Image (tube, helix red, strand yellow):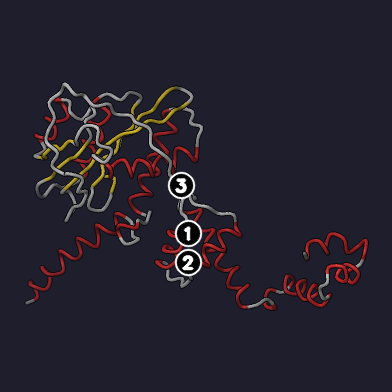
Amino acid sequence: MYAFIDAHRAEYGVEPICAVLQIAPSGYYRHHQQQADGARRSARAQRDEQLQGAIQRVFTQHHAVYGVRKIWNQLRREGTAVARCTVARLMRRLGLCGVVRGQRPITTRPDTAAPCPQDLVQRQFTADRPNQLWVADFTYVATWRGFVYVAFVIDVFARRLVGWRAHTTMRTDLVLDALEQALHDRDLDGRLVVHTDRGSQYVAMRYTNRLADAGAAPSVGSAGDAYDNALAESIIGLYKTEVIHRRGPWKGFDDVEYAALEWVAWFNTQRIMEPLGYVSPAEFEEQFYRSQAAPAERLALN
């Protein structure tokens, strides 16, 4: 309304326009004074302006993927007390919207002729400690130079991405290299189960032999079960939604590999997750190790 008056005041004058619109000219002039001097605005308007800056910052810092719930929780983590409905209102004003996942395409195909390990997980994607249960899967990315395949290994305890690799083919080397990275980076201090679907890459002899060498137990979901590897598919769905679908089209392998590297680093150290109590995977693991160390420290003091 005030913008309309601004646009036509030179031609018709403020008072005649206000008379037609049935508003008081004093309200229009007060609005202009408030725009010129922020201290004249209401406390709510000043607070909204501060919050809008914080919301825009969090949205930008976290790859422009957070919706209302995660931005609200991130602001609370930073010590900003704000209502969730306020965050929703200001995000609408700023035109900000989190990404929404779609259906994930099928990549791996079951090899019904190959012998498969038992399903040791039975859809129970939970763990009491790090390096107790890993899940693995891979996906594809269409580029101008052909398909790029990206494999992930996820530690179920903190949803941490412990291994990943990108290749231009979806042979066993793809998933085996991701597994090698995970085994190299993690200190296995107990029984580990590695769960996958029945894709031919995961039931190949080279893959199962490598698990045996590492002292890990293989686990494979049931055939034709949409939930046999649900956690891995969920994390890959986040990757496709937050990176691939937002930032394409992709030129080639190098672009996809660098984007995956960048996303994995952010995901592990900064991305807050609802199942973890709105902390990052790295922070969730740190909390676990601190809780394990505290009793030992108290015992040493006694």
Amino acid type at image mark 2 = Arg
User: What label does residue 68 carry, if any?
Assistant: 1
Image location (x, y in percent) of residue 263 = 39, 44
Instruction: Locate residue 230: give its quadrant.
Output: top left
User: What label does residue 84 carry, if any?
Assistant: 2
C-alpha span from label 1 to label 3: 12 Å
- How packed mark 1 is, by other alpha carbons closer than 10 Å (few <14, some 14-19, many 20 or more), is many
- How packed mark 2 is, by other alpha carbons closer than 10 Å (few <14, some 14-19, many 20 or more), is some
Position of residue 53 relative to residue 110, above or below, is: below
- How packed mark 3 is, by other alpha carbons closer than 10 Å (few <14, some 14-19, many 20 or more), is few
Image location (x, y in percent) of residue 195 = 19, 39
The residue at 6%/77% (across/down) is 302
Between discs 1 and 3, the one toward the N terminus: 1
Q: Is residue 150 left or right of residue 299?
A: right
Callout 2: SS: helix
Image location (x, y in percent) of residue 103 = 40, 38
User: What label does residue 100 carry, if any?
Assistant: 3
Image location (x, y in percent) of residue 253 = 41, 28
Amino acid type at image mark 3 = Val
Closer-to-camera residue (31/290)? 31
Callout 1: SS: helix
Looking at the image, do the residues carrying marks 2 and 1 touch, with CB atoms under 8 Å apart? yes
Position of residue 285 relative to residue 173, above or below, is: below
The residue at 12%/26% (across/down) is 115
User: What label does residue 99 carry, if any?
Assistant: none
